[in-house]
Image (spheres, helix red, strand yellow):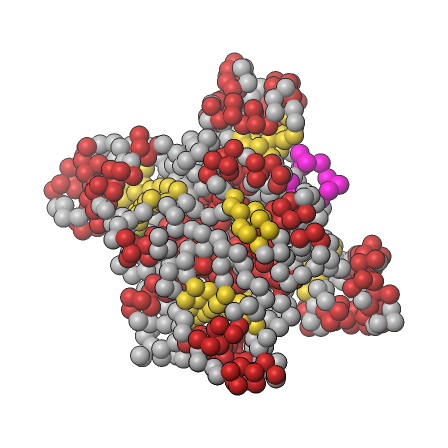
């Protein structure tokens, strides 16, 4: 079956996790993505973990999972000859996604034909212009600028980032969303667009920021480390074989939870049906909840409570996630065949839409260099010359 | 072609979206489509009050005149760039109006628990029979299909269930102390935009719309590439690393003289030398020094960390970030909301937008997730009020003033909730 994005051609330049996450969302839905690999492999190929802890440009988890189905050509984008090759590759595409240091990004944008060329999405930490535009950042430092890290810590103690490169992948997905939209736009109104996407703005503008609370309420809400004993149950609680995550503090949620644990009388108990009284009786409530949790596995807690429509979920690690019955039933994970690793498991489609999504193995470093140059009508002599001066590999 | 200047984004001009979702993830996804130029209509729940406008204990409602449900942060935050019709779809006339809206639309976003929209009488089968070109994005916590169909959760439960909660803490801390977070409310809306565009492209091939089963769990799970790789490639669970990195030293947060935290990292020898220069210890970066190489820095992680702790505690955060950045290493302040608002770069880029909100007056709202030339997004509509565009939308569907009045009388539509 033809995939929804077949026929769309996208170029990725930057060799970063952010850029690779962006173009993954094209290639898995059938677009052709040419990945311009950096001569040193770039961040995406050099980031651990590696298969059997052996560092290699081919076997890093990020490369394996995020470079699926792409074509790889290695080009030194800082050389004039390399730039010329890049400009010809770009001319044959609808979208170019760039995530290089700002000055290098601008030079790539200059290569694009402003009349007939592709649209561009330039990703940078702070945006292409302005007093901080030249700053060097990483996933922790961009995250720090968005209020999430501060809220994730607790009063007076250390702030905390999220999982490794989670923020990067969110930025990449944001770039894919706007990139897909401007391809659609250009198809319909013939106008090419240049997107200037600041990672910090993309994270800071999204809904889970603390900024809007402050602007509208004048106060800041912290999620904060440590158990909330004023309003409960919310957060992580221990059960028989591990932990569950509750969000069952509010009226109907709390009532249904009381019913689920076999104590419907607690709904009208004056200790718990008034917010101020409730905040004084956490220990008393735990005398009912704890025994119920202690004889049930996280899976049992999850299923029994969900029967009462109580918001609770199992807190699991990765070995459990891949075997989770919902994940198995939905094919949330898929296997790809990697020529060095063999069969390996990666995350499946971000949403299910018939057979629109398919993950193919990632390309070896520079494996498509010759094929792409040939298609662009570079002669054998020219290819050798480009190779000899180090513009391609 | 000559460059045109637009007042709003045009990329998705002509695409009509119905937003049938509540709380954060679905509505914000619809707003992002609105930012891109789509015509988005919110089908506001009526007469039942939308969950996006909570008035329960612990709700976040800004002080001001007018109905409280128009002042909730969740409503204001996730509902720009759409029009609003408050419609009783359980009423026969309401159902007919919804049917007419479906006939004219390209995409429906619905965020109920699995099964609820069917109970309202609008199954995918029925919607597709009304308009074969329409695509439906259905986005329950764990998706439409599978044994967890119908289960309910907030973002915190979803992220815990795919393995994030256990890897983002500090190992020394108690597991029960790890706070929940709501990142899935940020990642699902992005996938709503992508699913919409993939469906529109697919429609070009198949000449019909698609049903999209968007599990908010799956839409986020693929952000956990590193932790999954630890398991699948090396058969071990990812560690809780706090703010450290196994292969980068330094990589941490440090408390400064003015009691603020600063995130600092040096990812290679060059950045490390820059950091040493910034901190007035240039010799630490030299090859003769044990800390001058990455292997040396890994070996002396604790010593380097405690030196940085010491130095940072004697400097003010602004100056520290500035001087480290000037020397080419990584540093940023760990900001709260006022700190984010003090970001000079964002002001220079006019990121914050002065928006006149109903009942609350002008507020500096967050800007957009992207800028673009020639048609950057604008706040064409600030957050919509209940039923604000009833007449406008119904007139577009061909109803006259008389019938609209009757709809109000019979509570088919409304412009306020009974509090």
Instruction: Give the residue displayed 37% in from the left and 55% down from the top.
Output: A3
The residue located at (59%, 80%) in the rendering is: A387
Viewed as shown, does residue B180 lie left or right of A177? Answer: right
Residue A262 placement (x, y as % from top left): 53, 15
Q: Quadrant of residue A74?
A: bottom right
Q: Residue at x 59, y 71 (%)?
A: A38
Q: Nearer the viewer, residue B355 or B306?
A: B306
Instruction: Indicate left or right for B242 with A134 as reference.
Output: right
B335 shown above or below A314: below
Question: Could you tell me residue B240's position as x and y percent?
Answer: 69, 45
**What count of labels does the image hold?**
0
Residue B171 drawn in magenta? yes
**In percent of the image, x 87 and y 65: which residue is there?**
B290
Q: Whole-percent x and y of residue A207?
A: 48, 49
Considering only vertical position in the picture, is A351 above or below B197?
above
The image quarter in which residue A269 lies: top right
Which quarter of the rendering shows the C terminus of chain A? bottom right
A180, above or below A375, in the image: above
Reply above or below: B261 against B239. Answer: below
Q: Is residue A292 left or right of residue B240?
A: left
Q: Is residue A57 magenta?
A: no
Range shown magenta = B165-177
Judge whether residue B332 can be spotted in this image: no
């Amino acid at each position: 079956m033809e995939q929804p994005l077949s026929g769309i051609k996208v170029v990725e330049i930057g060799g970063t996790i952010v850029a690779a996450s962006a173009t993954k969302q094209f290639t898995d839905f059938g677009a052709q993505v040419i990945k311009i690999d950096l001569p040193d492999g770039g961040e995406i190929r050099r980031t651990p973990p590696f298969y059997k802890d052996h560092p290699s440009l081919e076997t890093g988890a990020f490369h394996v999972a995020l470079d699926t189905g792409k074509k790889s050509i290695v080009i030194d984008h800082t050389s004039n000859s390399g730039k010329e090759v890049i400009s010809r590759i770009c001319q044959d595409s609808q979208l170019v996604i760039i995530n290089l240091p700002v000055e290098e990004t601008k030079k790539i944008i200059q290569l694009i034909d402003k009349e007939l060329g592709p649209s561009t999405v330039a990703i940078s930490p702070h945006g292409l212009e302005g007093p901080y535009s030249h700053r060097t950042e990483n996933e922790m430092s961009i995250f720090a600028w968005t209020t999430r890290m501060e809220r994730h810590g607790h009063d007076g103690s250390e702030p905390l980032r999220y999982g490794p490169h989670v923020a990067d992948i969110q930025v990449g997905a944001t770039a894919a969303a706007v990139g897909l939209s401007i391809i659609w736009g250009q198809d319909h109104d013939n106008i090419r667009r240049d997107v200037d996407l600041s990672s910090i703005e993309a994270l800071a503008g999204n809904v889970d920021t603390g900024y809007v609370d402050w602007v509208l309420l004048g106060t800041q809400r912290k999620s904060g480390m440590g158990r909330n004993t004023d309003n409960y149950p919310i957060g992580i609680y221990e059960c028989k074989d591990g932990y569950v995550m509750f969000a069952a503090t509010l009226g109907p949620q709390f009532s249904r939870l009381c019913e689920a644990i076999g104590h419907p009388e607690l709904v009208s108990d004056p200790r718990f049906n008034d917010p101020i009284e409730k905040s004084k009786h956490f220990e008393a409530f735990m005398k009912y909840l704890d025994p119920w949790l202690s004889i049930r596995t996280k899976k049992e807690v999850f299923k029994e409570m969900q029967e009462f429509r109580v918001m609770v979920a199992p807190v699991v690690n990765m070995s459990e996630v891949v075997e989770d019955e919902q994940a198995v039933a939905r094919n949330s994970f898929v296997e790809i065949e990697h020529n060095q690793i063999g069969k390996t498991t990666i995350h499946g489609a971000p949403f299910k839409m018939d057979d629109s999504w398919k993950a193919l193995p990632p390309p070896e470093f520079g494996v498509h260099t010759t094929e792409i140059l040939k298609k662009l009508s570079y002669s054998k002599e020219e290819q050798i010359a480009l190779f000899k001066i180090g513009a391609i590999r | 072609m000559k460059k045109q200047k637009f007042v709003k984004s045009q990329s998705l001009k002509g695409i009509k979206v119905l937003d049938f979702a509540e709380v954060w993830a679905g509505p914000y996804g619809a707003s992002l489509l609105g930012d891109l130029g789509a015509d988005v209509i919110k089908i506001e729940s009526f007469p039942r009050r939308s969950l996006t406008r909570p008035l329960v204990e612990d709700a976040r409602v800004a002080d001001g005149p007018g109905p409280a449900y128009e002042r909730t942060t969740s409503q204001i935050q996730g509902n720009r760039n759409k029009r609003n019709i408050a419609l009783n779809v359980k009423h026969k006339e309401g159902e007919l109006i919804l049917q007419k809206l479906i006939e004219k639309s390209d995409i429906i976003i619905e965020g109920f628990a699995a099964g609820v929209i069917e109970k309202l009488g609008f199954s995918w089968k029925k919607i597709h029979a009304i308009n074969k070109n329409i695509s439906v994005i259905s986005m329950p916590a764990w998706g439409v299909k599978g044994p967890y169909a119908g289960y309910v959760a907030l973002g915190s439960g979803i992220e815990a269930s795919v393995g994030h909660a256990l890897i983002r803490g500090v190992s020394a801390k108690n597991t029960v102390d790890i706070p929940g977070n709501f990142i899935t409310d940020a990642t699902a809306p992005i996938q709503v935009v992508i699913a919409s565009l993939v469906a529109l492209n697919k429609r070009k091939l198949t000449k019909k719309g698609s049903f999209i089963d968007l599990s908010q769990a799956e839409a986020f799970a693929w952000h956990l590439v590193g932790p999954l790789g630890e398991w699948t490639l090396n058969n071990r669970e990812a560690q809780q690393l706090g703010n450290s990195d196994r292969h980068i030293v330094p990589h941490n947060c440090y408390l400064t003289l003015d009691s603020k935290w600063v995130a600092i990292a040096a990812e290679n020898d060059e950045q490390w030398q820059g950091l040493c220069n910034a901190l007035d210890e240039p010799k630490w970066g030299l090859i003769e020094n044990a800390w001058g190489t990455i292997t040396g820095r890994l070996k002396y992680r604790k010593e380097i960390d405690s030196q940085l702790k010491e130095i940072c505690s004697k400097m003010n955060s602004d100056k520290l970030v500035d001087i480290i950045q000037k020397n080419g290493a990584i540093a940023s302040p760990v900001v709260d909301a006022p700190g984010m608002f003090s970001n000079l770069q964002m002001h220079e880029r006019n990121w914050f937008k002065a928006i006149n909100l109903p009942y609350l007056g002008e507020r500096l709202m967050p800007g957009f997730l992207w800028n673009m030339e020639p048609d950057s997004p604008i706040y064409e509509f600030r957050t919509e009020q209940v039923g604000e565009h009833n007449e406008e939308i119904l007139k577009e569907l061909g109803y006259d003033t008389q019938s609209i009045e009757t709809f109000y009388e019979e509570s088919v539509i409304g412009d306020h909730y009974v509090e």
